[in-house]
Image (spheres, rainbow, N blue to C red):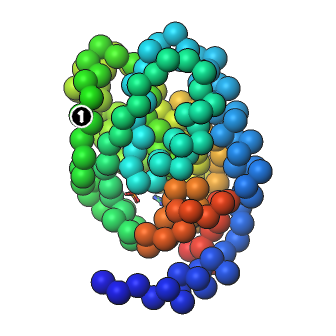
Amino acid sequence: MSVDLAHIRQVMAEADCLFNHAEVEAAIGRVAAAINAELAERNPVVFCVMNGGLVFAGKLLPLLDFPLELSYLHATRYRNETRGGDLFWKAKPEISFIDRDVLIVDDILDEGHTLAAIVDFCRHEGASAVHTAVLVDKRHQRKAAPDLKADYAGLSCEDRYVFGYGMDYKGYWRNAAGIYAVKGL
Ligand SMILES: O=P(O)(O)OC[C@H]1O[C@H](OP(=O)(O)OP(=O)(O)O)[C@H](O)[C@@H]1O
Ligand code: HPA
């Protein structure tokens, strides 16, 4: 599929900045402090949810000051689109986490189907406790379950399609150094 780079550039030029670099970094610092306070003695396996969780995990991990193991998994529901579909596992966890605490790190809790499915998977596969951290929780009433929340959420954003800090618009702008909302979405 060919990509219209002019459109991709225009989306950034017209986007609304919801959180600038300093605001996002401060939020990541707060999440790290909370995790340090609560999980330091739990010897967790931290799973970065690819691709979106990459930037958040990369910023968060050096701020955690206790022993942990790192791995990744890749589950996707959006596949470079702006609407979610069925969850598709591109890579299931390879490291054993039976009887271990697991910390799932992802960029965004939107409708929450992705996080809920990953949490179910980890519990089913024998994790003793599953903790969740997201950079952004999107505010709306369409959550997969009404009480669905992450244990740690850096920021709460309005109900718009957002990108930056790992989150993509059509596969682009995961590298944006702030969190932006697409004009009109
Ligand atoms: O709460 P939900 O509505 O389920 O959406 C959140 C998920 O969607 C995005 O992943 P995506 O499917 O786009 O895969 P990607 O991270 O590879 O872009 C994001 O990284 C979350 O994992
Ligand atoms: O608003 C979003 N932006 C980027 N990726 C996403 N995945 C779910 N919601 C979003």
Can residue 149 be seen by looking at this rendering? Answer: no
Along the line of sight, the residue nearer the viewer: 65 or 39: 65
Q: Residues within 10 Å of mark 1 (few under 14, many from 20)?
A: few
**In this view, 114 is above or below 129:** below
Can residue 171 be seen by looking at this rendering? Answer: yes
Q: Position of residue 119 (x, y in %)?
A: 35, 33
Q: So how many labels did they put on this image? A: 1
Residue at image coords 66%, 60%:
177
Residue picked out by circle 1: 94
Q: Position of residue 124 (x, y in %)?
A: 23, 26
Q: Position of residue 102 (x, y in %)?
A: 39, 25
Q: Position of residue 165 (x, y in %)?
A: 58, 56
The C terminus, quarter of image: bottom right
Residue at image coords 32%, 55%:
76
The N terminus, quarter of image: bottom left
**In this view, 79 is above or below 47:** below
Instruction: State left or right for residue 164 relative to residue 120.
Output: right
Q: Quadrant of ligand 1?
A: bottom left
Instruction: State left or right for residue 72 relative to residue 19.
Output: left
Instruction: State left or right for residue 131 relative to residue 139.
Output: left
Q: Mark 1 falls on what kind of element?
A: loop
Residue at image coords 66%, 40%:
28
Mark 1 C-beta to ligand 1 under 8 Å: no
**In this view, 35 is above or below 93:** above
Residue at image coords 64%, 54%:
157
Looking at the picture, which amino acid does disc 1 mark? Glu
Instruction: State left or right for residue 154 relative to residue 91.
Output: right
Q: Quadrant of residue 161?
A: bottom right
Q: Quadrant of residue 9?
A: bottom right
Q: Quadrant of residue 145?
A: top left
**In this view, 137 is above or below 2:** above
Spot the residue most to the top: 41
